[in-house]
């Protein structure tokens, strides 16, 4: 299929995982999901990445978000490798790892790039919203580990975007002031939101919404 674009429906699939057979849409439910691929088990960069995702367990839960890793290696390899990940990260791996031996998931999400070395996936990331839409995608080469703090930050930004007529400025972090959409007048913004500051007629900051 063609490369997924922002706003597309995230393709559904059923696959074996380290936590049993999983139907993606059913498993995701009505929350958010982070679907990310890694090239191979028992490799150094991937070991650090999956360990970091495990360390962030509470952060994902706080955002009503599930995480799912994808690899084209076999299920028995995943199970054997989990011990190494947990040893390096100092925590348990409590999320499923898809065994995508037939490359069905990797092909659905265009995770295998020609010329990237072999037929294993590159480091793809998809943030998928409660409606099942792809809201953000990132692609890293196999040699560069991802920054999952940035993925969390982007997830926070998307959730703020959905909370009202808001966008987020450069380098924004959770709790910082947000930008009011140009479709809302400054007068209306001051009536609706807290601490509105007009820097330019088209650039108005407001206090971040609270849950």
Image: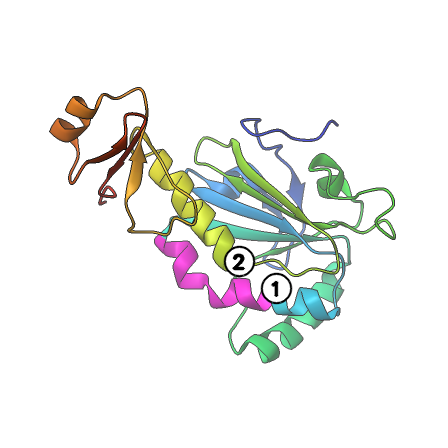
- Residue with the mark numbered 1: 49
Q: Earlier in the sequence, mark 1 or mark 2?
A: 1
Q: Mark 1–mark 2 contact, CB under 8 Å? A: yes
Q: Find the magenta span and give its range.
A: 50-62
**Dot 2 surroundings within 10 Å: few (below 14), some, or many (20 or more)?**
some
Question: Which secondary structure is most common in the magenta stretch?
Answer: helix
- The residue lying at 53 percent from left, 27 percent from top is 7
Is residue 40 positioned above or below 81 on the image? above
The stretch drawn in magenta includes residue 11:
no
Q: Quadrant of residue 201?
A: top left
Which quarter shows the C terminus?
A: top left
Return the residue at label 2: 148
* Residue 210 rendering spot, x and y as whole percentages: 22, 45
- Above/below status of 31 relative to 71: above
Quarter of the picture holding the N terminus: top right
Residue 138 position in % (x across, y down):
61, 44
| Residue at left offset 20%, top offset 25% | 186
**211 sits left or right of 29 in the view:** left
Residue 79 in view in this figure: no
51 is within the stretch colored magenta: yes
> Mark 1 to mark 2: distance in Å?
8 Å
The image quarter containing residue 13 is top right
User: In what element is the residue under mark 1?
Assistant: helix
Q: Which percent across, then down, holds residue 147?
A: 56, 59
């Amino acid at each position: 299929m063609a490369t997924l674009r922002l706003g597309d429906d995230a393709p559904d699939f059923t696959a074996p995982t380290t936590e049993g057979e999983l139907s993606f849409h059913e498993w995701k439910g009505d929350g958010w999901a982070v679907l990310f691929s890694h090239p191979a088990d028992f490799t150094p960069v991937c070991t650090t990445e999956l360990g970091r995702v495990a360390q962030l367990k509470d952060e994902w839960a706080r955002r009503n978000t599930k995480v799912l890793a994808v690899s084209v290696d076999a299920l028995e390899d995943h199970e054997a490798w989990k011990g190494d990940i947990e040893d390096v990260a100092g925590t348990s791996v409590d999320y499923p790892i898809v065994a995508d031996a037939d490359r069905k998931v990797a092909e659905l999400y265009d995770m295998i790039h020609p010329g990237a070395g072999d037929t294993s996936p590159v480091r793809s990331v998809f943030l998928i919203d409660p409606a099942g839409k792809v809201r953000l995608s990132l692609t890293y080469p196999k040699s560069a580990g991802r920054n999952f703090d940035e993925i969390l930050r982007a997830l926070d930004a998307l959730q703020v975007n959905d909370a009202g007529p808001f966008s987020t400025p450069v380098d924004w972090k959770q709790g910082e002031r947000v930008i009011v959409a140009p479709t809302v007048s400054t007068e209306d913004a001051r009536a609706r939101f807290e601490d509105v500051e007009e820097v330019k007629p088209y650039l108005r900051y407001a206090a971040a919404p609270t849950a």
